[in-house]
Image: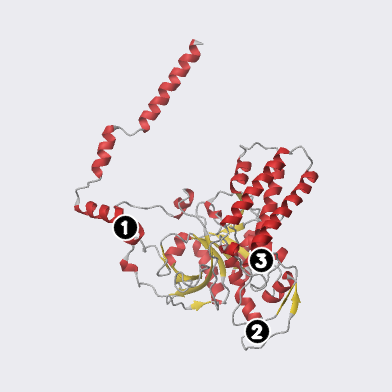
Amino acid sequence: MKKTLFTLFIGIFYLGQIFAQIGVSAEDLKKIKKSYDKEDAYTKAVTNAVSNNSIKNLALNRQNIGKYDHNFKYKVKVKGISNQKQSGRCWMFTSMNILRYKTISNLKLSGFEFSHNYLYFWDIFEKSNTFLDLIISTRKSSYDDPEVRRLLSGVIGDGGAWNSFVNLSTKYGLVPKDVMPETHTSNGTSQMMSILKNKLRENAVFLRENKEKSVSELNKEKIKMLSEIYRILAINLGEPPTSFEWRYKDKSGDLSEYKTYTPLEFMKEAIKMTSFDDYVMFIDDPSREYYKLYKKEYDSNLSGGIDWTYINLPVSKLKEFALASIKDNEAMYISCDVGKQLNKDEGLLDLDNYDYQSIFGVEFSMNKKQRMQTYQSGSSHGMALMAVDVDSSEKPVKWQVENSWGSSSGHNGYLTMTDRWFDEYMFRIVIRKKYIDDKTLKILKQKPIIVPAWNPAFMIDN
């Protein structure tokens, strides 16, 4: 007993020493406070300015205004700007935007949009099914189990990526926007998602409390649960068509005859493809080994669907492939950290847009790898890469993306990114195989390295 008390005393003593070492002493605090010289003229001025104004407005670098134009030597023939509004569907809008011009060309249209609402219905329905499947498979694990915590804390959401679009369109096809237009809920999804999460967590409790039942019995309960999810979605978004009649007016003004389609039949006619195997997903993640194949765990929005599988390459190689694609009139799905150094009014992404260092007199010096490792930066928003400007030696100077925030955002709905910004904040890109060299394509034959879902390189686009 005495030995136990002595050991406890020693432990408390050393614990106290540790806390004493990491604490800030009065002398330390005195030095820290002295470093902020409030009587210094600049410090007084900047304190008054920042405490009474927007930090971003004050940090705006006026020398960068008007420095870059929005003209490009090579530009994909795109038409029209979409608007995801108050929803996290950028990945879906981007995927459809890179295919939209194919439909316009194939059907000789003056403009066109796919129905985002149609595919969004099936995305949330399939995510709900996947969630319930995972709850059933982990039903005997503790609530404190990391995987169970991950499932119940996230449940489902609007976000996704290219593979999410491939999974859905391959199973459910595509329809024109006027066949299943947007609703109030699809333009602002937060209330519906809150209700669905509530219901799915309630379903999870039931499945876990009946964990001794067989998987077959629980799957029957799951179908009943999905019927309620379907009902909530249909009331909010409308019921997706299994077939529809559609006609169109081409750019010459000629009106086609009505034709009956299933969504899969329409997709085949509109984009002349039913498989997306020709597309390869890439990432520039300097925190992991290059020229390797990676796969994100627990990813697919659809049970049995494909997960994010990427080749990790230096950004210089991604530029090489992207340049070839744009020159051949092929837009690409990209994902980047769009919020970093974005001047929304100018429609410009550049490293020198905002000078926070001069405002605070504090250096910010992390590189791309360090920002990713510390979660300071990661992929967050999908857009369509569709233009590049080059110098006399054909080296990229700046790039342009078609965004999905409406035509009043950025430069008429587009954003221009300088090549330096591309280096630092571009992460993922999807490119067709014909623009990729054979050596790189062979990497697809590697056994993928599994990457945890929480890796910042694999943040979902929304």
- The answer to which image quadrant residue 254 occupies is bottom right
Choose between 218 and 29: the one closer to the eye.
218
**Position in image of residue 433 (x %, y %):** 63, 68
Name the residue: 43% across, 19% down: 10
Q: Which residue in the structure is indicated by mark 1?
A: 53
Number of marks in the image?
A: 3
Res. 445 in view: no
**Position in image of residue 227 (x %, y %):** 73, 54
Q: Which residue in the structure is indicated by mark 2?
A: 249
In which quadrant of the rendered image does the C terminus lie? bottom right
Q: Which residue in the structure is indicated by mark 3?
A: 118
Q: Do the residues labelled 3 and 2 touch (CB within 8 Å)?
A: no
**Position in image of residue 308 (x %, y %):** 62, 57
Circle 3: residue type: Tyr
Q: Do the residues labelled 1 and 3 touch (CB within 8 Å)?
A: no
Neighbourhood count class around disc 2 (C-alpha, 10 Å): few under 14, some 14–19, many 20 upward: some
- The answer to which image quadrant residue 21 occupies is top left
Distance from the alpha carbon under mark 2 to that under mark 1: 52 Å
Secondary structure under tag 3 reads helix
- The answer to which image quadrant residue 96 occupies is bottom right
**Position in image of residue 361 (x %, y %):** 29, 52
Distance from the alpha carbon under mark 1 to that under mark 3: 43 Å
| 453 up-or-down from 338: above or below | above
